């Protein structure tokens, strides 16, 4: 547990020490999505938060690039493993960090968007808990998928495309089922959590079995 905490703190320090332009990018991203939520025309048609699900891809993709891919490319991941931390502590520490950052950004969008809508558009606007739950499930799926694919895929440009395709397939499956049956939104959450859990297991297996850290081809 202490090793996992150390990895989370290490990733946070790396994030805080990033180029200031990165914070500007995240700020613009969160404000944009918050305004989308606040001024969407038909909020009742978005009981399942499709926009939040795909927003989670954007957020986790940016953090995964730094946490998983960049460190593998520049050799920092191999140094980190040789520093005494177990591979599982490194894996779960990185996943927890990405999840925390993704959830914080998602919650900001939900709260800021709902507050803005209640002030300017609809005084009865309120936060839908199911939106937040589905978003967290999607963030877990994307993070676990990125951890697994960062080992299995040699081209970093294809990693997040593959993640997006898999996420889209799950969303489409839920949409198709909803067209014929009364499928509640929590079923989508269950599908995302199950898929995310499978990716977590697969990622742990890949990290444990990898003898030599292979650099990703650019």
Image: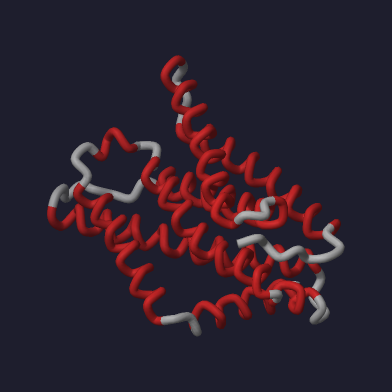
Q: Residue at x 48, y 80 (%)?
A: 18
Q: Which colour scheme is used?
A: secondary structure
Judge by depth and name the residue closer to the eye, 211 or 97.
211
Q: 66 above or below 52? A: below
Query: On the image, which quarter does residue 146 sit in?
Result: bottom right
Judge by depth and name the residue closer to the eye, 141 or 18.
18
Q: Which residue is drawn at 34% across and 62% down?
A: 29
Q: 54 above or below 27? A: above
Instruction: Spot the residue most to the front.
Output: 218
Q: Quadrant of the N terminus?
A: bottom right
Q: 88 above or below 38? A: below
Q: In which quarter of the image is the C terminus?
A: bottom right
Residue 180 lies, in percent from the top left, at 45, 15
Instruction: Spot the residue most to the top.
Output: 180
Residue 22 lies, in percent from the top left, at 41, 74
Number of numbered tags placed on the structure image: 0
Residue 41 lies, in percent from the top left, at 19, 40
Q: Residue at x 29, y 33 (%)?
A: 45
Judge by depth and name the residue closer to the eye, 84 or 109.
84
Say whether residue 91 is left or right of residue 60: right
Judge by depth and name the residue closer to the eye, 129 or 171.
171
Query: On the image, which quarter does residue 27 sit in?
Result: bottom left
Q: Residue at x 64, y 52 (%)?
A: 144
Residue 178 lies, in percent from the top left, at 44, 22
Say whether residue 102 is left or right of residue 209: left
């Amino acid at each position: 547990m202490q090793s996992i905490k150390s990895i989370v703190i290490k990733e946070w320090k790396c994030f805080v020490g990033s180029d200031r332009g990165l914070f500007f990018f995240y700020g613009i991203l969160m404000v944009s999505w918050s305004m989308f939520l606040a001024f969407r025309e038909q909020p009742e048609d978005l009981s399942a938060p499709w926009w939040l699900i795909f927003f989670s891809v954007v957020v986790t993709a940016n953090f995964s690039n730094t946490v998983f891919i960049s460190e593998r490319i520049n050799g920092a991941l191999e140094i980190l493993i040789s520093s005494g931390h177990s591979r599982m502590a490194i894996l779960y520490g990185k996943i927890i960090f990405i999840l925390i950052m993704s959830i914080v950004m998602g919650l900001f969008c939900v709260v800021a968007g709902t507050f803005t809508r209640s002030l300017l558009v609809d005084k009865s606007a309120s936060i839908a808990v199911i939106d937040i739950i589905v978003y967290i499930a999607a963030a877990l799926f994307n993070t676990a998928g990125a951890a697994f694919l960062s080992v299995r895929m040699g081209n970093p440009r294809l990693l997040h495309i593959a993640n997006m395709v898999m996420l889209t397939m799950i969303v489409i499956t839920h949409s198709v089922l909803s067209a014929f049956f009364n499928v509640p939104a929590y079923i989508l959450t269950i599908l995302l959590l199950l898929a995310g859990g499978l990716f977590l297991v697969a990622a742990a297996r890949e990290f444990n079995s990898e003898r030599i850290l292979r650099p990703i081809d650019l």
